[in-house]
Image (cartoon, rainbow, N blue to C red):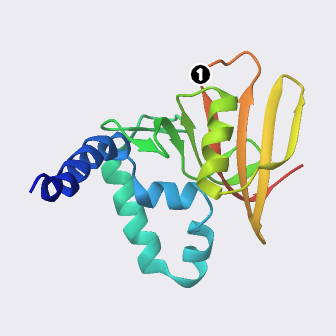
Amino acid sequence: MKIRFLPGAVIAVLLAIIPARAGDDVSLARTIMCKDSWLDWNKNAPAQLKQFGDHFRSEFSHNGNDAFSTPVKPMTVAGLRVMQAYPESVGMGVGFSVIVEAPFDKTRRVMEREFGKPLQKCDAGDGMHMCELDIAEQRTFTVMAEDDEKNRTLVGCYYLYEK
């Protein structure tokens, strides 16, 4: 008779563990990880672009001339807390990225686990650490952090950028 209760106990334990990722925003994560592309939506699926834009505006707040938006409530991507979002560009890059509250090495490990493979084209110099992973034509996933920034890392999908 006790064996019948074992599956229920296992399910209860799993349900207690799973909420650690409950704050993940799936549509945001898909865009950051180059699974979805607002550049493609702009050309081929304006309804999807509008739906994502509406979702983004409901979840983020923009202040004046800031280049970024901030989440209106706590939010994570791959379990990493999102601090800011850059919905169009950063510097010379055009894409979609966020700043997460995590050091570069941890963020890299988390993203490699999410992709199921190591990031490539890693470089350190000019006060920065950066790794990339080519996903498709005009889709490059990037992880980047300044050397002196210990707990903030930029992650995102870039469609076009100057190298």
Determine the residue positioned at 42% across, 65% down.
Answer: 52
Query: Position of 9 compared to 33: left or right?
Result: left
Amino acid on which the number 1 mark rests in the picture:
Asn
Query: Position of 15 compared to 133: left or right?
Result: left
Determine the residue positioned at 77% across, 55% down.
Answer: 133
Determine the residue positioned at 42% across, 62% down.
Answer: 53
Q: Quadrant of the N terminus?
A: bottom left
Q: Is residue 158 in view from this perspective?
A: yes
Q: Residue 127, position in %: x, y?
A: 84, 22
Tally the numbered discs.
1
Determine the residue positioned at 55% across, 75% down.
Answer: 41
Query: Position of 107 compared to 137: left or right?
Result: left
Q: Return the residue nearer the eye: 142 or 59.
A: 142
Residue identifier under label 1: 151
Q: Return the residue nearer the eye: 56 or 73.
A: 73
Q: Residue 55, position in %: x, y?
A: 35, 59
Q: Residue 22, position in %: x, y?
A: 32, 47
Corner quadrant of residue 159: bottom right
